[in-house]
Amino acid sequence: MSVLFAASEIFPYAKTGGLADVAYSLPLALAKYTAVSRVMPLYDFMPFENFLFYDNFTITLDAEHYGITIYTKKEDGIVTYFVKAPYLSQTQHIYGDENGDYKNNALRFSIFCMAIIELGLRLNTKLIHLNDWHTALVALYIKEHSLNIKTVFTIHNLAYQGIFDKSYLRMLGIESQYFTMEGLEFYAKINLLKAGIAYSDAITTVSPSYAREILTEQFGCGLNGFLQIYKEKLTGILNGIDYEVFQPLQDRSQKKKAKSKFCKKFGFKKRERPLFVMVSRLVAQKGIDLLVASLQQLQEKNMNIFILGEGDKKYTRLLSKLAKKYENFSFYQGYDEALSHQTYLASDFLLMPSLFEPCGLNQFIAMNYASLPVVHEVGGLRDSVHETKAVCGRGITYTEQNQKEFMYAVQRALELYKQKKKMNEIINFNLSCDFSFDKSAKKYLQLYMSVL
Ligand code: ADP
């Protein structure tokens, strides 16, 4: 079996969030059991001097021809293919800039999808693993051309669906017969995610709880009814993290030093206080509103809070303002991989008050850095962090997304911090757990075999 794993972002080449991490670490874990290669766009902002030319060809959408060049690079034993194409590659970011999403994203990623198929045919691939809406049209094009390639489609976050004006239909080479409720139509627009749901051979999402939640109105983002039709082919497989990138902390003395240095760097006056952090995209999903609403009360507690994040302007502005106002709160705006590692290492607790969370990776990273997650019990957080059960992944959890519950969870964390012995036991237990991708890779493998 040979699998082609397709994603719009793969760490370390291009990353905005967890998708890139998964697209890096899942194929690595799979490679122990089966032949696997990856494909992603080659964005102009990526350094590509040491990529090798692999192939070139032309793809056609609505009688328009697009010249594609494929480059490759082998790293950690895995070959990644990079698609250089008009529009797709000619951007300085992956999806958009400060003015919002790029206007031609529908075309950019449809070209990507056609290129994935052509590459798949040239590689004689029998199975393509698709990820999120950017790759979803592959499933439709395969069906349309009756190709002998199976597809597994993973939903990393149902909130992102690739919704575009109906007028794009032709440009994307999609026959109008697909513009129905059973197909891509969504409130008179095109919904590309629906192509992955309807036409793939199997659907997965990134945790068992999220797989159940997305079938409900509360978490279904308008697609719960549509997903219900396909629920027989939907499973939830929990993500993991790469143990080369995020090794469990061996030397705990490192942590103390890192915390002291970190607190000094970010201007905390009382550096011995427990340090609560967030490392996050700043979007409503991540519960920033609840955190902001609670800051006044949190300020009265014996704790420091640090946020590393980039995202919506309304949050970056607000957090910058609040960081000036509160002595125990500091905010660093930006996307910074190295600083994220320092942040996890320095922290005592990681806050994840997410409204919804398909899986979340930060909690695994934190636990490997001897930091305890404080999470809203939802989606993948429900499956990976436990307060009362002595099973792998221990932290503080709360069930209702409101200030009272959140503050009470923080209070329990603060109490735990005072009980050094108990806290250490929990941390050591987490450090002995296996949060790697290996278990999940085996589940994906079974699924691949079931569709082939
Ligand atoms: P999502 O995909 O919704 O953003 P995940 O929890 O699945 O959330 O993955 C987030 C990943 O991105 C983690 O590896 C986290 O450490 C990283 N990350 C998020 N924001 C930043 C940031 N501002 N700087 C560095 N890394 C970040």
Image (cartoon, helix red, strand yellow):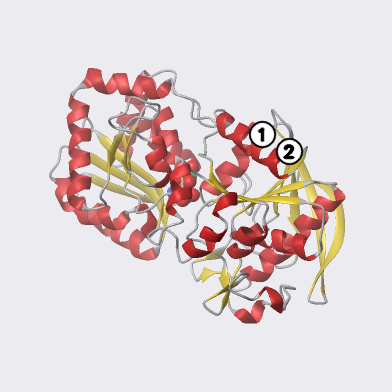
Indicate if the residue with disc 1 has its beta carbon within 8 Å of ligand 1.
no
Mark 2, residue position: 36
| Number of numbered discs on residues | 2
209 or 13: which is nearer to us?
209
Report the residue that reaches farthest toward the bottom. 167
Sequence order check, earlier mark of 1 and 2 = 1
**Image height check: is 270 above or below 326?**
above
The answer to whether residue 385 shows anywhere in this view is yes
**The quarter of the displayed image where residue 242 is located:** top right
Residue occupying the point 57% across, 42% down: 22
**Looking at the picture, how far across and down is residue 422, in whole percent?**
24, 20
Q: At 73% across and 76% down in the image, what residue appears? A: 175
State which quarter of the image contains the N terminus. top right
Residue at the image position 22 percent from the left and 28 percent from the top: 417
| Mark 2 residue CB less than 8 A from any atom of ligand 1 | no
Task: Name the side, left or right, on which 435 lies relative to 47.
Answer: left
Circle 2 packing at 10 Å, graded few (<14), some (14-19), many (20+), is many
Q: Position of residue 249 (x, y in %)?
A: 44, 23
Given the image, on which type of amino acid does mark 1 rest? Answer: Leu
- For the residue pair 20 and 198, the one nearer the viewer reads as 198
Identify residue for label 1. Answer: 30
